[in-house]
């Protein structure tokens, strides 16, 4: 099964293009690909339960693994235990794992 | 140790401008510790990341001397990553896009950095297990 | 390996560089034998508009004699065998008519982007 890792570095408070990764992830998952959305840098800001976290929870409900870079979370004082439903903290190693395992990795 | 892989990363950001630069170094650190071969194609402002003339400075707002401030200097981090890769059985091949170097006057880079071209990026990508582009905005 | 480059960034340093550096990069890679397809999305769809004109800038007695000609550069890439595609809705969202574009650019509907991406062994995002 083809694997995709979409890295989202932008946040919906600053950018109106975070829909790109959200929609691409949804389409890819619907086509039975294995999809991970990895939030990094300001991309982790919507991971707190709040105005935009519902989109992330919805993605997780669609079978997409939604991860948030632990360092980016800690850097912003976001408690890993209080992330939006469906979002899990993860180390940046996930990206190197995906690259080494041949996933298609896209940085947005 | 994980199987040795070769990955290529293309970057574009000049130092001190974006969190992307730090994330890139974090990725290289992980790969270096695994003993991977890591190709970096530095395009546009990223050719300044290993610029040898970078100098640390004090921080008067915090009342720190040069030594106390121990300011992050990208070229030193890159040199340290090159050592780390070698110590773990891998290598970092850092290629600065030559025309980008010329127009920015970034000719002097640390040892281990070589001048290249877009053809190098393509060839490195073709010879890698995988490639990641971290473009600028 | 067949590579898809998705280009979103537009008009970033194009006057200084006298090119879009990513379009330029792809011209150089194609010249080195690369197997590339370009998908323009977001503001980069505007690069297909033939009427772009950045000529005439001067700073003191320095005059820019080689302004960027991005639409022509994309047409040249196409002539070299690079498929130039664009996200159709991104064009219409910006009020751009298809008859304003260079010849040969192919639309991809937004809902098909994932399927399009799946055709390529490697995907780069700029």
Image (tube, rainbow, N blue to C red):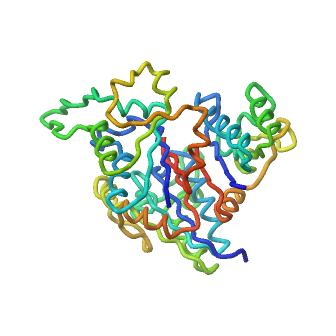
- Relative to B62, is C25 on the left or the right? left
At x 35% / y 37%, what residue is drawn? C104
| Residue occupying the point 56% across, 43% down | C116
Q: Is residue A104 above or below residue B126?
A: above
Q: Nearer the viewer, residue B47 or C110?
A: C110
Judging depth in this view, the residue of B86 and C12 nearest the camera is: C12
Up-down relation of residue A82 to residue B114 (above or below): above
Measured as percent of width and height from the top left, residue A13 is found at 64, 28
**Residue B109: x, y in percent?**
39, 66
The residue lying at 50 percent from left, 70 percent from top is: B127
Residue C16 at x, y = what percent? Answer: 29, 41
Q: Quadrant of residue A58?
A: top right
Occupied quadrant, residue C10:
top left
Q: Is residue A17 above or below residue C74?
A: above
**Horizontal arrangement in the rendering, residue A25 relative to residue B95 (left or right):** right
Q: Give the percent coordinates (x, y) of residue C26.
A: 38, 51
Q: Is residue B35 above or below residue B118?
A: below
């Amino acid at each position: 099964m083809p694997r995709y890792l979409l890295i989202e570095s932008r946040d919906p408070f600053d950018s109106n293009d975070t829909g790109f990764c959200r929609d691409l992830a949804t389409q890819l998952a619907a086509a039975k690909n294995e999809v991970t959305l990895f939030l990094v840098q300001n991309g982790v800001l919507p991971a707190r339960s709040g105005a935009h976290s519902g989109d992330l929870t919805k993605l997780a409900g669609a079978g997409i693994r939604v991860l948030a870079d632990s360092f980016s979370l800690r850097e912003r004082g976001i408690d890993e235990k209080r992330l939006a439903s469906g979002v899990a903290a993860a180390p940046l190693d996930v990206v190197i794992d995906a690259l080494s395992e041949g996933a298609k990795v896209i940085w947005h | 140790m994980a199987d040795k892989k070769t990955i290529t990363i293309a970057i574009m950001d000049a130092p001190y401008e974006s969190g992307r630069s730090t994330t890139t170094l974090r990725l290289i650190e992980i790969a270096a510790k695994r003993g991977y071969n890591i190709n970096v194609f530095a395009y546009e402002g990223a050719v300044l990341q290993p610029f040898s003339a970078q100098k640390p400075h004090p921080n008067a707002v915090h009342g720190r001397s040069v030594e106390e401030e121990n300011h992050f200097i990208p070229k030193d981090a890159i040199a340290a990553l090159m050592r780390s890769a070698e110590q773990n059985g891998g290598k970092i091949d850092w290629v600065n896009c030559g025309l980008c170097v010329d127009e920015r006057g970034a000719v002097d880079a640390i040892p281990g950095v070589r001048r290249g071209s877009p053809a190098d990026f393509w060839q490195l990508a073709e010879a890698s297990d995988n490639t990641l582009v971290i473009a600028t905005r | 390996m067949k590579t898809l480059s998705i280009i979103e960034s537009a008009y970033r340093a194009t006057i200084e560089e006298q090119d879009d550096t990513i379009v330029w990069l792809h011209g150089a890679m194609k010249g080195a034998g690369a197997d590339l397809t370009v998908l323009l999305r977001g503001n980069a769809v505007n690069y297909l508009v033939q009427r772009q004109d950045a000529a005439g800038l001067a700073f003191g007695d320095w005059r820019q004699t080689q302004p960027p000609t991005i639409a022509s550069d994309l047409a040249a890439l196409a002539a070299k065998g690079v498929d130039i595609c664009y996200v159709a809705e991104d064009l219409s969202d910006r009020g751009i008519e298809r008859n304003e574009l260079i010849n040969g650019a192919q639309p991809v509907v937004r809902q098909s982007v994932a399927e399009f991406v799946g055709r390529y062994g490697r995907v780069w995002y700029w």
